[in-house]
Image (tube, grey):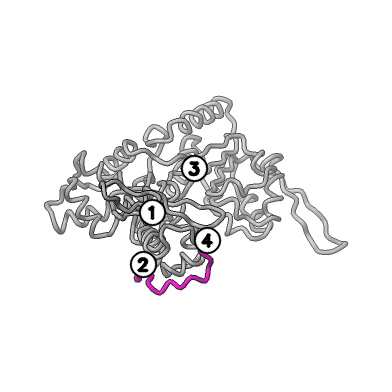
Amino acid sequence: MNWDDTTDPSNAPEGLGAAEDRLVGSVADGEDQAVEAALRPKDLGEFIGQEKVREQLDLVLRAARARGATADHVLLSGAPGLGKTTLSMIIAAEMGAPIRITSGPAIQHAGDLAAILSSLQEGEVLFLDEIHRMSRPAEEMLYMAMEDFRVDVIVGKGPGATAIPLELPPFTLVGATTRAGLLPPPLRDRFGFTAHMEFYGPAELERVLHRSAGLLDVGIDTAGAAEIAGRSRGTPRIANRLLRRVRDYAQVKADGLVTREVAAAALAVYEVDDRGLDRLDRGVLEALLKLFGGGPVGLSTLAVAVGEERETVEEVAEPFLVREGLLARTPRGRVATPAAWAHLGLTPPGARSTGNGQPDLFGT
């Protein structure tokens, strides 16, 4: 059966809260940005994880320094919170150059980009976050700036408009994107080095946590770091955020030392379970399992059932649930996997027990 988007979700779970307030969200807020500035490594030697990217990038930067030239343009793709901004700052530090930071949504007109490019110094690094969200006119201007280090500034309108060529000093563009597939091929091809940032493994996150704990003056043992790492969704930003909340709990409820027991108790207070799911994630799974029997169910119906916008469920909750193998997207709708039933401790409707104690998978 295919659930359409008119199903009545009168028994929907309530009080899931705003998605933007999630402790396990990968987008940095003001507090995160301030803390990240203090925790960021200053060179490639300090940067933890992304071994292949670090090795390749090190070769690119060392070769550029040996030639006395600016580094090739760099494109970094991957989920939020994996270190794209940090790597851009490391590139500038390794090249001994200043860095200018802006974002794609902030550049709505070609003139905005021309103003930034014309003020760059020779060798400067321009970090353009969310580059796929830049306006099309600015994007077309960027092609020439990256390849020929010049832009044509249009003066006037209509038949009397003229193009004035403006020479630019050599610079390095570092573009970051969470949606590499949205970049047009002409732009992607102009980057000399591209790298995809992978999610971190538990051991790498433990190293991140020990380093951050030292900088924050937080006492943490190996088991405590492992407990937090296991709930951090493979993302250093989330690991550091959870560490700060566990630190608060340890200072108030314990002796200040983060152990496995303290970390587990603290994250239970903040409703982050042992797989990193929070209230929104569990609300989506509970609605899917309890209201719709595991699906398939339409996205709009599922969003109404959890009291969130369709985009919130699709872009905030679902990617992690799919990556964890708890939910599947199908042409007929969203479907829960056996792992989702097991995680919530529920029994699938078709797995009723037979007289001999074995599950009856066919409902007979």
Marked residue nearer the N-terminal end (2 or 4): 4
Q: Residue at x 48, y 33 (%)?
A: 53
Taking the image as drawn, is residue 172 in sight?
A: yes
Residue underneath mark 4: 2
The amino acid marked with disc number 1 is Gly
Dot 1 falls on a residue whose secondary structure is loop
Separation of marks 2 and 1 at Cα, in angstroms:
34 Å
Question: Which residue matches tag 1?
Answer: 363
Q: Is residue 16 magenta?
A: yes
Q: In the drawing, does residue 123 fall left or right of residue 243?
A: right
Q: Which residues are magenta?
A: 1-17
N-term mark: 3 or 4 = 4
Instruction: For marks 2 and 1, give the one nearer the viewer.
Output: 1
Label disc, if present, on residue 16 of the rendered structure: 2
Q: Which one is closest to the eye, mark 2 or mark 4?
A: 4
Q: Amino acid at mark 4?
A: Asn
Helix, strand or loop at label 4? It is: loop
Residue 209 image point, x, y percent = 29, 43
Label 3 element class: helix
Tell me the CA gap for discs 1 and 4.
19 Å
Q: Which mark is drawn over residue 88? A: 3
Q: CA distance from mark 3 to mark 4?
A: 46 Å
Q: Nearer the viewer, mark 1 or mark 4?
A: 1
Image point 39% across, 32% down: which residue?
45
Residue type highlighted by circle 3: Ser
Dot 2 lies on which element? loop
Q: Residue at x 64, y 42 (%)?
A: 188
- Mark 2 / mark 3, whichever is N-terminal: 2
Residue lying at the far left of the rendered structure: 255
